[in-house]
Every structure is written in C-alpha cells, then in structure tokens.
C-alpha cells in the first residue's frame, strides 16, 4: 500500500483526491494540504486523516511515500525540490515552472537525489490515444508520414489567467507537443509557428494569442501539424489523426450521448463534452494509477521530468518562431 499526500485541492486536486480515496486500491491518502478552507472541507468529506494549510506537514510527514503536487504553477518547482530532499516520490501537474532555468535546476536536483518524478501529461493516458500509440508500435499504420492534432477549448479562460499562463503554446499546446513526442518517439529538428488573435482582442492586449498553428519536423522526417484555439462554439474539440504507409487512424471526439435524432433535415448527433474534466476523466484516473504501479513495481515513471522539458522546449521554440517569423531549429536552444 502506497501512502500518499497531496498539495493543493483545487479543480485538479479534487479529481485526484477523490480517485485515490475511492477508485485506486493500491494507495491510501493520509494527508492533504490546501490554503483555503473550501479545499480542506472537500478532503475532510473523504476522511483524510491529516488535513492542513501547512505544506511542511505533508512534505515532512514520516509515513508518506509519495506526494501529488496540484498547486498553482508558481509553486511547483519549489515543492518538487523540497519533496525530493525529503526523499518523497513526486507526481507533479504540468509544468514544473514557466522558467526554463528553474526547470533545468529542478531536474538537476531530482537527478542528484534520485527520487522518482512523474509529470502529469494526462492526455497520454487517454484510452483512445493509447490505442493509436499501440497501433504505431505494432506497425499497423506502417511507416509514419504525418500526424494532425486539433485542440480547441470551448471558451477562453479569464484574462487574469491568460496573463500568468505563459501563453497559449506554453499553457495549452504543450499537451499537444508532448503527444507529438510520445507518438513519434523521435527528436524534433525544426519548428515553425504562427499565432493570431481571432477571438478576443483583450487576449492580445494581455500579450497572448488565441489561435495558433505549429508545424513540427522530426529527424525521421515525420511532420506533425498542431492547431490550437481558445474557443470552439460547439464544445471541447480534441482530435487526432495519424497517417502512414499502411493506412490512417484517427480519434474523434466522444459525445455526451450516443443517441441520434433523425428527421427530414438529416441526422443529428449529441453535443461534444463540455471541457477537459469530462473529456479526460478516465485519463486522470489512469495516470495516478500508473504512478502508483510504477512505485509498487519499482519501474521507471511512464512520463518523466525530461518529457516535460522536451515539451517546454518546443513551446519556447514555437514562441520564438512566431515572433521572429521563421523556422527555428531545436539545435539553437540550450546552446
């Protein structure tokens, strides 16, 4: 039985907390921290033994094996370092930090101490995307040629969030950068990106874009096209298509129901799911389950700190490409 703690009981923290307490038999949650009373009351509903506003009580708890970090981004790296020095295994929501320098220094601490670290790029765990990955590995699609990833939110976040998010490529498209790395399993050679404001001029005033396009060229000549948008009027839009010498495979959007209404105007399907909490409910459960199983079986983490670094570097390259209006070679970074 893996004994867990959790830091942060907001929107994502609540999902993980409830899953651990009700759906993951190999783990038990013995401590939870949240600054506000609302989050602490949520943990108390699940009879978590220690509920506190003091992170140190969780970090230094002698019985805890591993801790989930679900706090705002600006606290991630500091908590990772503190937990690593306390000898705890770590599950951290993405990203480690918005500063490349701080991410690199944090990963150096992890390497020096040697504790397990898993980053929560939960979309890898989606059963639909997992099936596509398996078909690629088994050679059913043949030699990969192209991948097309579409990621559109139902509505933009508040401007206050935009201002502190790191930008569309770092905040939103970073999941798609990780997915591209995961599916292609090679190194990106070149990045070309464009970004515009088509949805809300206030997003532009906040220094960000709301619509982005990125073309990744891998060393094995596979190309990945990623489309990102902050607003789709029809709901959350997450689709994926891979094309190779033996065929094509795609993952479509799951809908709210499988019902169809048919009349003289045609066939009418149900709506898209509302947002990521609905769309990726299964993957949130599966990623924490994978973290627990890796600890139990003493195996490498399925999504390591270096995976997060690779996705972050692609976001940095995409921003550089967009602002400088040119192709950016990945060799230009970290020189």
Image (tube, rainbow, N blue to C red):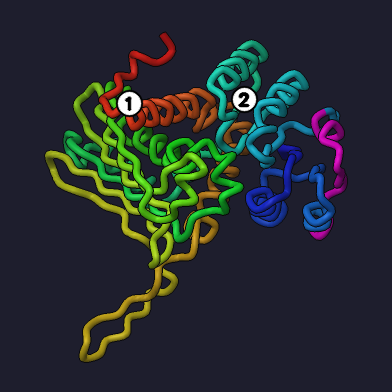
Q: Which residue carries the number 1 mark?
A: 324
Can you tell which quarter of the image residue 305 is in? top right
Give the alpha-carbon distance from disc 2 to disc 1, as whole Å.
Answer: 38 Å
Specify the farthest residue to the top: 335
Q: Position of residue 71 (x, y in %)?
A: 69, 40
Give me the residue at 16% from left, 40% from top: 244
Location of the C terminus (image quadrant): top left
Specify the farthest residue to the bottom: 264
Give me the residue at 43% from left, 27% from top: 316
Q: Is residue 311 magenta?
A: no
305 left or right of 233? right
Question: Residue 75, relative to residue 243: is it above or below?
Answer: above
Task: State the extent of the magenta-drawn residues as a range.
Answer: 44-59
32 left or right of 330? right
Callout 2 crowding tier (Cα within 10 Å): few <14, some 14–19, many ≥20: many
Q: Which residue carries the number 2 mark?
A: 116
Give me the residue at 75% from left, 23% from top: 82
> In this figure, what is the number of numbered marks?
2
Q: Secondary structure at mark 2?
A: loop
9 left or right of 264? right
């Amino acid at each position: 039985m893996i004994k867990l703690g959790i830091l942060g009981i907001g929107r994502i923290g609540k999902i993980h907390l409830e899953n651990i307490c009700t759906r993951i038999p190999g783990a038990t949650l013995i401590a939870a921290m949240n600054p506000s009373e609302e989050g602490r009351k949520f943990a108390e509903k699940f009879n978590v033994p220690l509920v506190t506003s003091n992170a140190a009580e969780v970090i230094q708890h002698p019985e805890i094996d591993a801790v989930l970090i679900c706090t705002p981004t600006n606290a991630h790296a500091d908590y990772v370092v503190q937990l690593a020095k306390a000898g705890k295994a770590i599950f951290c929501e993405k990203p480690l930090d918005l500063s490349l320098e701080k991410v690199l220094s944090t990963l150096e601490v992890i390497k020096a101490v040697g504790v397990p670290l898993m980053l929560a790029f939960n979309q890898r765990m989606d059963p639909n995307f997992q099936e596509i990955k398996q078909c690629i590995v088994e050679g059913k699609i043949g030699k990969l040629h192209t991948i097309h990833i579409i990621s559109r939110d139902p509505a933009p976040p508040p401007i206050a969030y935009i201002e502190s998010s790191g930008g569309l490529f770092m905040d939103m498209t970073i999941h798609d950068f990780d997915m591209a790395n995961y599916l292609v399993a090679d190194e990106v050679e070149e990045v070309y990106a464009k970004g515009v404001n088509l949805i809300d001029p206030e997003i532009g005033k906040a220094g960000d874009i709301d619509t982005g396009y990125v073309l990744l060229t891998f060393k094995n000549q596979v190309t990945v096209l990623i489309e990102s948008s902050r607003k789709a009027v029809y709901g959350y839009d997450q689709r994926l298509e891979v094309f190779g010498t033996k065929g094509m495979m795609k993952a479509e959007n799951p809908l709210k129901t499988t019902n169809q209404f048919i009349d003289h105007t045609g066939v009418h399907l149900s709506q898209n799911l509302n947002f990521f909490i609905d769309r990726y409910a299964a993957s949130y459960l599966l990623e924490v389950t994978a973290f627990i199983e890796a600890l139990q079986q003493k195996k490498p983490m399925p999504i390591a700190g270096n995976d997060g670094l690779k996705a972050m570097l692609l976001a940095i390259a995409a921003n550089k490409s967009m602002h400088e209006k040119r192709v950016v070679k990945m060799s230009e970074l970290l020189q």
